[in-house]
Image: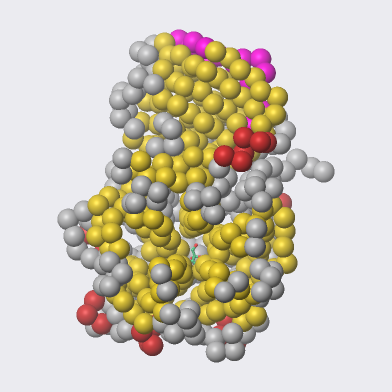
């Protein structure tokens, strides 16, 4: 078999295309994950829902395809994103039947978690049935939750202020790979927002209101978004904090923030279930890397909140297309809120996959690069604590071979972590200002913990105890690029408590 970019312990689409994770749920003893899939080609096409299931978040089994577009109301975009919920032992799947000028919600039901029956009354829900405030062209990605006896649905919308349809600035001329984005010649109305709906039976829904409004914690850009807050998610953390996650399209870049064309945000605050208003206390980006979108969470019976996400980004090239597939998903992450901040940790089950530990108590670098026997590989976990000392920059070079390297380092003067894939391997192109470097401001630190997961063409960095994460794909030679070097520039730095594990 020729060397492949396919990761070993991350979910990847077997053949064809995959985007958003959908319907993430614990049902009948297993965790089920569905994802947006076009099984015929490695590019977006009429959407199917593919299905995988797991008992440990690491080993996934392929299940039969859950949905495929076979109804007239699903023409031409298919069965777009959504969620699942259990009711009286049955699994209810809510999804968007998307057409270029109309997006409507549908329901399908299953008794075994594998076979879904679409409701004859589909689409059960249209913008028109609810409110003149919802623009029917952008009303998608239902996320259903239960509170007591009531079901609530969050969806991404374009919100028409006062229900009055008005023109706004023309969409720019950007080309996009996402068919649900504004086409350049078509002026979309309203602004990106989210709405809250409510129901007692999952079939009949009424409009509660829209979530985002002018408030002191929210800059204009957030409620004057020329796009949609795609793929909303909501959970209450153990700390009692309410967390709203969503993926705003086209959120303007602001300094070091929102460096990708499309972002994933978490907002901590309070959702008023009577009005739909979300009072925002804090807004932050979930991940500061390159490839992270459409995050969704599941609440486990043991109380953990686990997040998955698409480990790719729209409007970029996909080098794996040459292998007839495109689409990977993050290693699931455990979410908590600590001191008002979202903390992300690799799902604890991954520890069971560690093999052949190599431990080094301490390593110094001072204006040079250091490698250590036994610390190498590209399907590994690598942990260490960086003491930046007097260095200007210190960190690690990963996926190294003679020609390529991927950099992750702390810039002490700037107080930031940089992930640099300029010389990683196969070039990535995209509509971003810069597709090769992402930074994450962490401020002045004497000591920074890194927990890195390398998987052939994938890097996930958990930084400073999960206070920050940086995720991105790189495309070096899958067989040769296994070197690891520690480095410090402009002074000495030390690396402590190094641990390397093969992941199997
Ligand atoms: C987000 C998204 C969703 C939509 C789906 C279509 O990536 O645009 O809003 O439902 O992809 O595949």
Quadrant for residue 463, please give it.
top left
In the rendered view, would you say 215 is above or below 338?
below
Outermost residue to the left: 216
In the rendered view, would you say 284 is above or below 271?
above
Q: Residue at x 72, y 55 (%)?
A: 61
What's the magenta region? 362-380
Quadrant including the C terminus: top right
Q: Nearer the viewer, residue 186 or 388?
A: 388
Is 376 part of what is drawn in magenta? yes
Give left or right: position of 383 versus 214: right
Give left or right: position of 210 versus 428: left
Is 218 part of what is drawn in magenta? no
The way the protein has been coloured in the rendering is secondary structure
Residue 96 visible in the shown view: yes
Residue 108 at x, y percent in the picture: 59, 78
Q: Nearer the viewer, residue 490 or 127?
A: 127
């Amino acid at each position: 078999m020729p060397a492949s970019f396919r990761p070993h312990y991350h979910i990847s689409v077997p053949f064809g295309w995959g985007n958003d994770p959908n319907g993430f749920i614990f049902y009948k003893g297993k965790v089920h994950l569905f994802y947006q899939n076009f099984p015929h080609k490695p590019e977006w096409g009429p959407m199917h829902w593919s299905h995988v299931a797991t008992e440990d978040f690491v080993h996934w089994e392929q299940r039969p395809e859950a949905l495929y577009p076979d109804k007239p109301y699903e023409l031409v975009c298919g069965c777009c994103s959504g969620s699942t919920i259990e009711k009286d032992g049955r699994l209810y799947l809510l999804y968007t039947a998307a057409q270029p000028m109309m997006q409507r919600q549908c329901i399908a039901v299953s008794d075994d978690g594998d076979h879904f029956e679409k409701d004859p009354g589909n689409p059960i829900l249209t913008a028109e049935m609810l409110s003149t405030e919802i623009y029917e062209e952008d009303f998608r990605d239902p996320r259903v939750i239960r509170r007591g006896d009531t079901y609530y649905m969050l969806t991404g919308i374009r919100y028409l202020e006062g229900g009055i349809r008005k023109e706004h600035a023309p969409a720019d001329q950007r080309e996009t790979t996402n068919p649900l984005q504004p086409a350049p010649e078509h002026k979309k109305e309203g602004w990106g927002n989210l709405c809250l709906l409510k129901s007692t039976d999952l079939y009949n829904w009424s409009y509660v209101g829209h979530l985002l409004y002018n408030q002191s914690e929210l800059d204009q850009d957030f409620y004057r978004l020329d796009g949609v807050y795609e793929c909303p998610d909501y959970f209450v953390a153990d700390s009692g904090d309410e967390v709203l996650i969503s993926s705003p399209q086209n959120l303007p870049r602001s300094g070091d923030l929102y460096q990708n064309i499309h972002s994933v945000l978490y907002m901590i605050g309070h959702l008023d279930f009577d009005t739909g208003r979300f009072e925002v206390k804090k807004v932050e980006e979930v991940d500061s890397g390159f490839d992270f979108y459409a995050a969704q969470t599941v609440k486990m019976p043991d109380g953990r909140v686990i997040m998955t996400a698409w480990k790719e980004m729209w409007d970029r090239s996909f080098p794996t297309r040459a292998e007839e597939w495109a689409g990977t998903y993050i290693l699931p992450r455990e979410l908590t809120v600590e001191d008002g901040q979202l903390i992300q940790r690799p799902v604890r089950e991954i520890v069971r996959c560690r093999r052949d530990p190599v431990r080094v108590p301490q390593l110094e670098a001072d204006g040079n690069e250091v490698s250590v026997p036994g610390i190498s590989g590209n399907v590994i976990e690598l942990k260490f604590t960086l003491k930046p000392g007097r260095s200007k920059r210190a960190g690690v070079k990963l996926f190294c071979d003679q020609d390529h390297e991927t950099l992750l380092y702390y810039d002490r003067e700037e107080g930031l972590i940089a992930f640099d894939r300029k010389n990683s391997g196969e070039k990535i192109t995209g509509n971003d200002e810069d597709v090769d470097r992402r930074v994450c401001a962490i401020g002045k630190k004497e000591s920074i913990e890194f927990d890195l997961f390398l998987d052939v063409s994938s890097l996930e960095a958990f930084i400073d105890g999960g206070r920050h994460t940086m995720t991105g794909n790189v495309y070096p030679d899958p067989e040769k690029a296994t070197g690891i070097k520690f480095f410090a520039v402009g002074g000495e730095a030390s690396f402590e408590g190094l641990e390397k594990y093969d992941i199997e």
